[in-house]
Amino acid sequence: MILSYASQQDYDNMAGMDAGTPAWSPSDFAAMGAFMEAFNKELEESGELVETRGLEAPVHTRRIGSKNGVPVVTDGPYAETQEVLAGYWIVECDSFDRATEIAARLGECPGPEHVAARAYADIRPIQESRTEPEY
């Protein structure tokens, strides 16, 4: 699984709002969309893409916790959270190294420089069964 991250500020910037960092231009956003479509299509054509999804902005998040055994629901965004999961790709490929190569290509995604400077993705194997953990 390849996981990408963003903040509410990033979502606001992509929507064209100046949220303490410069807003994305319509052409910035269009270039990112075109890159993602081509990236996903290439993975689909190679047979490596299982599923991919982008997630809504953190403002649309609900966190479920517990206090004294009672469920507690809190609406987002969360001031203490700098970043949240923005989207993911599940890929079926030959090796962990190949998944790393795929994720590294996300660094080619066009966008404002201040965004690219702090962008990253995590790659984590999906555990196939509960008897399979490797630590």
Image: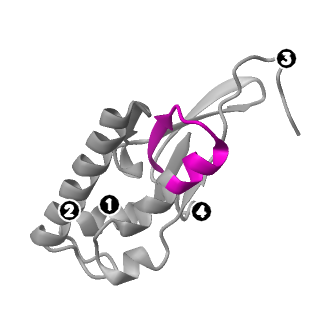
Residue labelled with disc 1: 11
Residue labelled with disc 4? 80
Q: Residue at x 28, y 64 (%)?
A: 12
Kindly report which numbered mark, 2 or 3, lies closer to the viewer in this rendering.
Answer: 3
Q: CA distance from mark 1 to mark 4?
A: 17 Å
What residue is at 58 percent from the left and 53 percent from the top?
Answer: 100
Q: CA distance from mark 2 to mark 4?
A: 22 Å
Label 1, residues with CA under 10 Å away: few <14, some 14-19, many ≥20: some
Q: Which residues fall within the magenta stretch?
A: 85-101
Amino acid at dot 2: Ala
Quarter of the image with the C terminus in it? top right
Q: Which residue is outermost to the left?
A: 26
Q: Which residue is mark 3?
A: 131
Residue 38, image x and y in percent?
24, 50
Looking at the rendered image, the disc whose residue lies closer to the viewer, 1 or 4, is 1
Q: Position of residue 18 (x, y in %)?
A: 25, 77
Question: In screen coordinates, is 118 left or right of 30?
Answer: right
Q: Pointer 2 and pointer 4: residues touching (CB < 8 Å)? A: no
Q: Dot 2, how many residues are within 10 Å of its Cα: few (below 14), some (14-19), or many (20+)? A: some
Q: Does 100 appear above or below 80?
A: above
The disc, 2 or 4, on the residue closer to the chain's N-terminal end is 2
